[in-house]
């Protein structure tokens, strides 16, 4: 009586394993790309906030009562009165400011000099939600340069 011996590692079997593993890799990559990257989303929102703030706003000389678009500059320079108005509107209605800015993330804005020392604008050292008391998993920092009193300064926007 003769028995037929099979080959376990036949070409068909190896090709099937190769195709299966390839499909599995493609599937796992596509599933991981479906979930948006949280850091990337925060960076976009931080950029959006900083883009708003480096402009003059609408109307150009906006106040707390008539602001449509928040901006902190006048003629390409930081306007200390607008910083004060921004601080006041954030203090009175933080969630409305987030709505005006078009973001859902929390934010914190401060200004620093060339040595990274925080500077006060009209006695205001920071604006927004205090990130130091929050339990934050992801924090994104956006820096923009402005002119204030004839000198370059940094406007730092933290988003989480």
Image: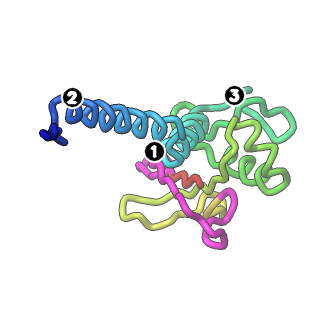
Numbered disc 2: secondary structure: helix
Quarter of the image for residue 108 reads: bottom right
> Above or below — where is 154 with respect to 64?
below
The residue singled out by tag 2 in the image is 12
The residue singled out by tag 3 in the image is 60
Crowdedness near tag 2: few (<14), some (14–19) or many (≥20) residues, C-alpha within 10 Å: few
Numbered disc 1: secondary structure: strand
Tag 2 and tag 3, C-beta contact below 8 Å: no
Numbered disc 3: secondary structure: loop
For marks 2 and 1, the one nearer the N-term is 2
From the viewer's perspective, is the residue at label 3 or at label 1 nearer? 1
Residue 44 percent coordinates (x, y):
52, 38
Find the distance from the CA under tag 2 to the CA under tag 3: 72 Å
What span is colored magenta in the figure? 127-155
Find the distance from the CA under tag 3 to the CA under tag 1: 20 Å
For marks 3 and 1, the one nearer the N-term is 3
For marks 2 and 3, the one nearer the N-term is 2
The residue singled out by tag 1 in the image is 144
Tag 2 and tag 1, C-beta contact below 8 Å: no
Q: Residue at x 16, y 37 (%)?
A: 4
**Front one among 33 and 125:** 33
Residue 28 percent coordinates (x, y):
42, 40
Residue 157 percent coordinates (x, y):
54, 51
User: On the picture, is 85 further left or further right than 136?
Assistant: right
130 in the magenta segment? yes
């Amino acid at each position: 009586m003769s028995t037929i011996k099979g080959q376990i590692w036949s070409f068909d079997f190896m090709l099937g394993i190769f195709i299966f593993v390839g499909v599995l890799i493609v599937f796992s990559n596509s599933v991981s790309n479906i979930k948006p990257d949280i850091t990337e989303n925060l960076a976009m929102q931080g950029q959006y906030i900083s883009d708003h703030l480096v402009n003059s706003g609408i109307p150009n000389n906006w106040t707390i009562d008539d602001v449509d678009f928040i901006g902190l500059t006048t003629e390409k320079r930081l306007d200390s009165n607008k910083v004060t108005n921004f601080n006041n509107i954030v203090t009175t209605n933080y969630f409305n400011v987030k709505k005006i800015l078009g973001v859902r993330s929390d934010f914190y804005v401060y200004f620093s000099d060339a040595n990274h020392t925080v500077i006060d604008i009209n006695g205001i050292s920071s604006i927004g939600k205090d990130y130091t008391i929050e339990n934050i998993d992801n924090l994104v920092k956006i820096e923009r340069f402005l002119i204030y009193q004839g000198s370059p300064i940094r406007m730092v926007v933290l988003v989480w």
